[in-house]
Image (tube, rainbow, N blue to C red):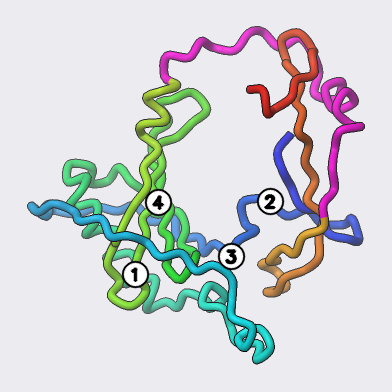
Amino acid sequence: MEEIYVTNDKTVTIPFSVNESPHLKINKMITWQTPIDKPFERHEINIIQGVMEEQAFSREAHPDGFPITEDEQGKCSLAVEDFLRCVFSEDTGKWVLKTLHRDNGFIHASLKTDEQDFRVFQRKLLIIIDPNSFQAVNYMDNESLLEMIQHVQAPEKITIHKQEAFEKIRGTIELKPVYVYDLKQDKYILCRKMDSKYGVNASNGDMVSLDDL
């Protein structure tokens, strides 16, 4: 069961992936003519943890709450292109800049390839951009994870319907209160996070603890 947020009036659901801050959709194919022939230097990332008491009482805006302007979008796109020209110099036309969002004082650029080689999983990149210099300072690549699972056996034949599986874990579903950013209202609203610590083996119908997987 995938985590999801449900508004208190039970009329709207919000995907789990948009909780931290609003993701700006870009969907731009990144291409270039010439590579950059120099090594990429990773920088240590200092994560913002919480706020000072005076910041809270003065209602100071958190840096992650500011929108990404059109000018910043253009600069981020150039930063992504320069990064790819340096680190993945042969991959012109392979990567799509999907979204931009602010996180812990930085701008995160999420990229995916136009191909899907690993069954249900897709190659992804997360490029971390300094919002002052608009230079890529670090990145995360899921390639090593995909290499680990490429030899995993295909799943067995499904023998149970998803409605039956839901009935098995119905009693284990938890609803936890949490504030979630709503893109339509442009503000944080109180919701319930719906989740379960259990799943159902689709091949035999047995209920299993996700902690044991």
Q: Residue at x 37, y 59 (%)?
A: 128
**For the residues bearing labels 4 and 2, Cβ distance under 8 angstroms:** no
Separation of marks 1 and 2 at Cα, in angstroms = 27 Å
**For the residues bearing labels 3 and 1, Cβ distance under 8 angstroms:** no
| Residue 110 placement (x, y as % from top left) | 43, 53
Q: Residue at x 8, y 52 (%)?
A: 37
The residue identified by callout 2 is 15
The residue identified by callout 3 is 21
Q: Which residues are magenta?
A: 150-176
Q: Residue at x 62, y 88 (%)?
A: 54
Give neighbour class at mark 2: few <14, some 14-19, many 20+ (Cα, 10 Å).
Answer: few
Kindly state the secondary structure of the residue where label 1 is placed: loop
The residue identified by callout 4 is 126
Separation of marks 4 and 3 at Cα, in angstroms = 15 Å
Mark 4 vs mark 2: in front = 4
Give left or right: position of 186 versus 134. right
Give left or right: position of 129 versus 195. left
**4 or 2: tag closer to the N-terminus:** 2
| Residue 106 placement (x, y as % from top left) | 42, 68
Kindly state the secondary structure of the residue where label 3 is placed: loop
Q: Which mark is residue 130?
A: 1
- 146 relative to 156, above or below: below
- 128 relative to 106, above or below: above
Furthest residue toward front = 53
Separation of marks 2 and 3 at Cα, in angstroms = 12 Å
